[in-house]
Image (cartoon, rainbow, N blue to C red):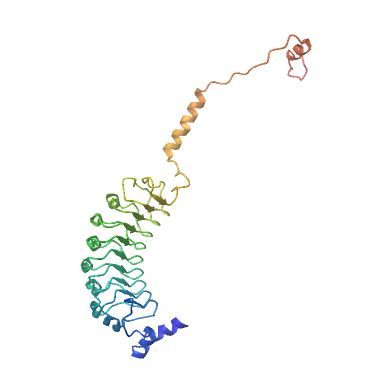
Amino acid sequence: MGNTIRGIIAFIPSNTCQKYLLGDLEEMPIDKMVDLSSMQLRRFPLRVCAFTELVKLYLSDNHLSNLPPELELLQHLQILALDFNNFKVLPLVVCSLKQLCILYLGNNHIRDLPQELCYLKNLHTLWIESNYLTYLPAVVSELTLLKTLHIGCNPIRNIPKELKNLTELRSIWMSGSLLTEFPPVLLEMPFLEVIDVDRNGIRFFPSLAHLPGLKLVIYDHNPCRNAPKVAKGVRRVGRWSEETPEPKKKFEVEAELDKAAENKETQPAAPTETPAPNNDNPQEAASTSTVQTSDGYNA
């Protein structure tokens, strides 16, 4: 019932209704953080822009589709959460927040990122999973301090070679995309520590043993017939990772069968030993010389 009432009130622009949604948001919070997540907001509350020393702003799980230009006043902002909203494009005013370190954009309707995103020189974490990206925007490769990149659950089929320019990147998460092969550019990024390609369409994995920084690779739910080879101490999550060996290739199975058959043919038959009759016991000697005829009688 509470969310229903909030949803109705969110359509009413009066100050009283907005105060009901925002509570007593009159003064700058001591912790320099404002959390307006799940408030059924349909427009950004301008009073927040008065808190110019604000460091963290959470607007997750609302109905926002745009942001006012006054947001530029928050030049100390380091964390901005816009995930689970209705953004179709990233508002350019976000790109003016020069101190921004972490940006959450997941679960929106974004198809591209503006070139102005490169102005965020301090950005080290970018979440843009579960959007409508069909490719990784080139501007991402210009975020030179980026350490963590979440781009999973987008219909992306390949990763551009320019990504290797991000020498500070340590983890890349691409689960639930449309990759049909392991991105070759990742093989040229020895500084990567975490690679997640879970739930894709990759049929073969190249060796990752040459990546000295790698600590974890997640490759489960792919139609692959091999596990990626990794250096000692690297954790793998997927089929044949730790507990059971990966299936042998067809030519390996055939070679083993041929070798087994060859060994069987060349192995000499074991001689059958017939016990020598004991001449010291005439009765036993007679019994050993008894032969059964075809009609069942003894001769």
Residue shown at 24% from the left, 80% from the top:
70
Tally of numbered discs: 0
Q: Position of residue 254 (x, y in %)?
A: 45, 35
The image quarter in which residue 46 lies = bottom left
Residue shown at 23% from the left, 56% from the top:
165
The image quarter in which residue 141 lies = bottom left
Q: Quadrant of the C terminus?
A: top right
Q: Nearer the viewer, residue 137 or 77?
A: 77
Q: Position of residue 80 (x, y in %)?
A: 31, 72
The image quarter in which residue 94 lies = bottom left
Q: Is residue 14 visible?
A: no
Identify whether 123 is placed above or below 185: below
> Would residue 149 appear left or right of 288 to someone viewing this image?
left
Q: Position of residue 34 (x, y in %)?
A: 34, 77
> Would residue 245 appear left or right of 216 to someone viewing this image?
right
Residue shown at 36% from the left, 85% from the top:
24
Q: Position of residue 115 (x, y in %)?
A: 21, 67
Q: Nearer the viewer, residue 253 or 28?
A: 28
Identify whether 227 is placed above or below 121: above
Q: Nearer the viewer, residue 270 or 292?
A: 270
Q: Is residue 194 visible?
A: yes
Going by the picture, which residue comes out furthest to the front? Answer: 30
Identify whether 254 is placed above or below 196: above
Q: Nearer the viewer, residue 257 or 216?
A: 216
